[in-house]
Amino acid sequence: MSHGTTARKGVAERLAEVLALGVVLVVMFVASRAVPSTEGAAALITAMGFLLLSGMLTSALLEIIGLPHLTGYLLAGAISGPHVLRLVDHHAVQSLAPVNTLALSLIALAGGTELRIELLKRVLRSLVFSMVLQSVIGTIVIGLAFLSVARLLPFTAGLTTPALVGVAILWGVLAICRSPSATLGIFSQLRPDGPVTRFSLAFVMSSDVVVAMLLTIAVALTRPLIEPSAGLALRDFMDLGHEILGSVSLGTTLGLALTAYLWAIGTGGFLVVLVAIGFGLTEGLHYLRFDPLLAFMVAGFVVANFSQQGEKLLSSVERTGNVVYVVFFATAGAHLDLPLVRQLWPIALFLGGVRALTTWGVHRLGSFLAKDDPIIKRWGWSSLISQAGLTIGMAVLVERSFPSFGAGFRSIAIANVALNELVGPILFKFALDRTGETGRGTQEMAFHESVRPPAPA
Amino acid sequence: MSAVALLLGLLVVAYVGSHLIGGRGDGLRLASGAEYIVLGVALGPYALGAAERSTLHAFQPLAVVGTAWITLVIGVGFGVREGRRISLGGVASGVALAVLSAAVASSLSYAVLARFSRLSGEQLWLFACGVGLVACETNRHAVRWVAARHGADGPLSSLIAEASEIDDIVPIAGIALLFPLIEPPAVSLLVPVWGWLAITPILGVLLGGTAAALLRAEPRASDGWGVIIGAALLGTGIASRLGLAPQAVTFAIGVSLALFSRHRGEVRAMLARSEQAVLLPLLLLAGAETEVKNPWVLLGLLAAALVGRFAARLFAAPLIARASRAPAGVAGPLAVGLLPSGALAVTLGLAFESRYPDVAGDAILAISVGLVVAGETVGPAALRRALSRAGELRPAHGTEAHGAPAAAIAEGTR
């Protein structure tokens, strides 16, 4: 089921996977028709098991035609979810929220661990040029594109021109948001290494922080445009400062604690520790109004760069995370509002197309100015197309800040994310395969090698 | 206590459990894990009230998954001890003892309930059979623990170890039959009762076979975990959804995995490592969830279960002693020594509690907890005496903690 084993898989293994997927689908179909709707433990457990197995099997089969695993997870969720086969219902999808919490914390921890200071130094020039240009030109061009079709969107009816400009700025900022989870999901499968991998990692992980700051600034600046009675609220900036400083401080403390644990005890029982901090600490951070993603990323960064324990942490997080990611992305697939995509697809396609073209063009410009390697110049943009949960989270933030048009804004954002979520990982995998970076990183141990029975007494 | 605090508490216990299997936790626990049950009772609504009942109910999915995982582990190692198939004598002794215990305990419970309660019909059968099923197993950990701690070796140690390994099939098959018989699943499909009885093993074999086929391709370690966890969760969820016994389905998944997978050794080792980490939080939950609604009837049922269990062992102990050519004086202490019940009894208690979250479930869980505590109080010392009288304790090891009891708990994986 992994990339590393693809070559070894023969017809018999592939047939076994097809049969297994058939068995899982039939069993689930019969069960869901026999007991059409259940709320509670049974629905949650069934959904988790089904999404895990069907996600793994779909991804294994799509691997044959070169599609990334992540696309398989998403498709398995979308097809079995509440909008198509209805094998997994809305309630079950909502109940899987704790898995998302755990997955996001592991993704952030792994992301931080991958960010090495040497790596940042190597790509610093490219990173600065690309980040500044993507943030400025990307926001402006994509915002203008939004403005050009704004009157076709139902939720903009009645908005004044300054208000429309404000909404377009918000859209522009949302459009430059990337997907750390999709990037790490691809890394987890392909184990790449090389210039494009390093650039993508550094850009996508650091853009999370940049976009969070830009969105706060954008919300504060556009409020007077959208709501003429409102003024510029400095309070928002103070809150942002508090959130960032608090998250970094707590993340540093967590990183030091993890380092001490890994040094003193090693990886024994570390799975339980990861689950505990994934759930418990996330709750605590939410309570304190800090950003869990940033805090976990800083924790991973501290462990990787200021101790010898980085590899231990990374391998533990990946081994735990690989199972959690399948459920996370399959749940994301089940969350995809396909009827909404069907309804808004022309506009979503237009906006997504403009975003992709702008990302490509701006990246080329940035690479030219930064005098990047030709390989980064050519393929570095491919990791910047994916969007996922972070973007939706930001759309929800916009909805909360501007309830008058927020729901419609969120809908078009979700439709757009759905397209980017499906297309982005495919493009990125294609790029990594073409550049030959796939498989150059450290490979995970095979199942039978990872567990050795105790020696006989 | 909030749900998050309770979850963190359970994770701390799981963490302790994950360390107990490597040998570092020698001497830190009892074989049955009764101390965690007592801790649960102490933290639960009856004593300190640290965990409220509503909070505990929120953890029902975890209890269902945890109990199903325990039976999955049992299923994967079923029929094998120290890497060898269990002998015919072991199979006969284990199954006969468990069936006899279940029958006697059920009959006595039925009599107590018929005399002292207003229960009738299916409810009466549910109570009586439930008590019988949680009262029939012998704790395999207790036997392994005593044998390893005191360096026991010989035909009697071997036979009772085998019997305690194999007898798990009886209560697990029991709930597979009982749940659909007492309350046939309310579903939109027309299925006769025998059909429901067949669905439990079929579902388990189907999912276990599927998982075994997927493991053939030698996937990455995390994919291997994914396949096993996915199959277990899907089986558990579907069985819960249909009103069947999830624990029986995962047991069948485990047996199928061990039968069909060429990586059965690795799977056994892998799952055995996870057992304590899952079991200890379950025991804590079981203790906290224990609810006594009608104390006198409950005491009567507990007494019936204990008497039934002891009577069956009094009858079987001389036969086991004779089969293993042990001296006649062994039978008495052996009968008491086989009293401990543990992980499986509590697992079944929790299974009843989640399937019948009313008086029946609460009572059966409370009885399983009572049996574990009572068995732990008298069992290990008596078993040691029996093995000593049989001349199977090596004097050099006497009371030394040789052989790492905690590591012995993982013995079945070899």
Image: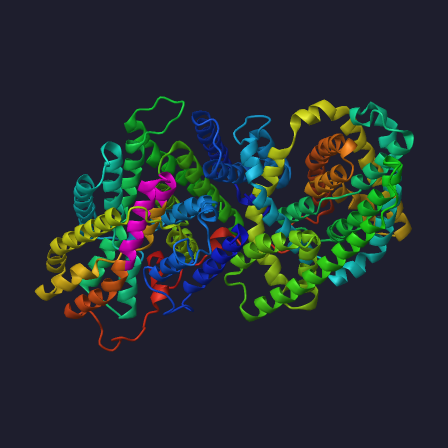
- Using the rendered image of the protein, determine whether residue B217 is visible from the camera's viewpoint: yes
Q: Principal SS element in the magenta part?
A: helix
Instruction: Work out which quarter of the rendered image holds the C terminus of chain A and state it.
Output: bottom left
| Quadrant of the image occupied by residue A31 | top left
- Residue A225, image x and y in percent? 89, 37
| Quadrant of the image occupied by residue A96 | top right
Residue that extends furthest to the bottom in the rendered view of this protein? B396
Residue at 24 percent across and 46 percent down: it is: B297
Residue at 87 percent across and 51 percent down: it is: A129
Is residue B365 shown in magenta?
yes
Position of B96 relative to A117 (above/below) = above
Is residue B315 shown in magenta?
no
- Using the rendered image of the protein, determine whether residue B135 is visible from the camera's viewpoint: no
Q: Which residue is nearer to you in this view: A119 or A303?
A: A303
- Residue A238, image x and y in percent? 81, 54
- Residue A27, image x and y in percent? 44, 31
Instruction: Work out which quarter of the rendered image holds the N terminus of chain A and state it.
Output: top right
Position of B248 relative to B140 (above/below) = above
Residue at 13 percent across and 60 percent down: it is: B321
- In the displayed structure image, the side of residue B271 where residue A165 appears, left or right: right
Position of B29 relative to B105 (above/below) = below
Region of the chain picked out in magenta, as a range: B351-373
Q: Which residue is nearer to you in this view: B305 or B145?
A: B305
- In the displayed structure image, the side of residue A293 where residue B280 appears, left or right: left
Q: Which residue is nearer to you in this view: B306 or A46?
A: B306
Residue that extends furthest to the left in the rendered view of this protein? B328
